Amino acid sequence: MEGTAEPASTRRPLGRPPLPWLKPGVVAGAAFPAASLALRAASGTLGANPIAETLNQLGLAALVLLVASLACTPARLLFGWTWPLRIRRELGLLAVAYASIHVLVYVVLDQAANLAAIAEDVAERPFITAGAAAFVLLLPLAYTSTNASVRRLGFARWQRLHRLAYAAAALAALHFLWRVKVDVTQPLLYAAILAALLAVRIIVRRSRRQGNTRAGEG
């Protein structure tokens, strides 16, 4: 629990981080979708439209990782867990990495780097418009993910900027929803999870404000 010192018998040696396997484990787990795609591509088992399958799997991995990064703070607020905050940055950066590869495959393999065709797609196909907007929002978040950026911007400004992650995730879920033509269960599930995570943050914030107001009146 936060704010409670550990007994001397259970304290970890100085300099040894808690759960040292956590971040490497997250990176290794996040590499699985890419490794699976590479193996399927090498064995020719990506189906009749390998580019579309690759785009779908890369986009899904990006969305899952982004939602996981947004779940870290609500997990602390609801359950008092501190370990999710240690991997929040890694989850976010891995989401951006998958999103970047997703965009690269679309630009180079799907559109053959035809900028006019890409611009037309972005302007005329709503699901691509939403996906492009989500990717654009993620870029400044990745760029300012360092401790140096927090110091340079100030924590309050940095925090306000990084709330754009919810907008990016919502646009990514919308991109997914509009991309799917038959069964929309999966994209609606991610949209519902996002709504629940945002609701937790809003409810806790309001509860704290009301508590502070009562304390001030007292």
Image: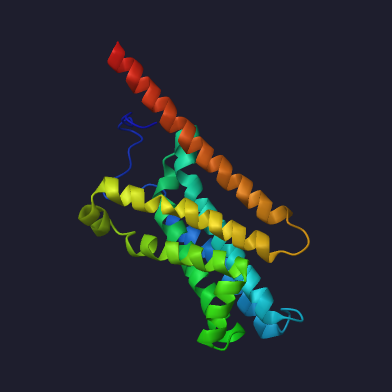
Residue 65 position, x and y percent, is: 53, 58
Q: Is residue 44 left or right of residue 78?
A: right
Residue 48 position, x and y percent, is: 77, 81
- Residue 79 visible somewhere in the drawing: no
Report the residue at 71% width, 78% height from top.
Answer: 46
Farthest left residue in view: 152
Farthest top residue in view: 218
Q: Is residue 166 left or right of residue 179?
A: left
Residue 27 position, x and y percent, is: 48, 63
Residue 209 position, x and y percent, is: 37, 26
Rendered position, 206 above or below 185: above
Rendered position, 138 above or below 203: below
Total marks shown come to 0
* Quarter of the image where the C terminus is located: top left
Q: Is residue 215 left or right of residue 172?
A: left
Specify the quadrant of the image occupied by residue 156.
Answer: top left
* Quarter of the image where the N terminus is located: top left
Report the residue at 24% width, 58% height from top.
Answer: 148
Describe the colour scheme in one phrase. rainbow
Report the residue at 38% width, 60% height from top.
Answer: 141
Rendered position, 122 above or below 74: below
Q: Is residue 69 left or right of residue 110?
A: left
Report the residue at 61% width, 78% height from top.
Answer: 38
- Residue 209 visible somewhere in the drawing: yes
Q: Choose between 179 and 144: the one closer to the eye.
A: 179
Rendered position, 192 above or below 120: above
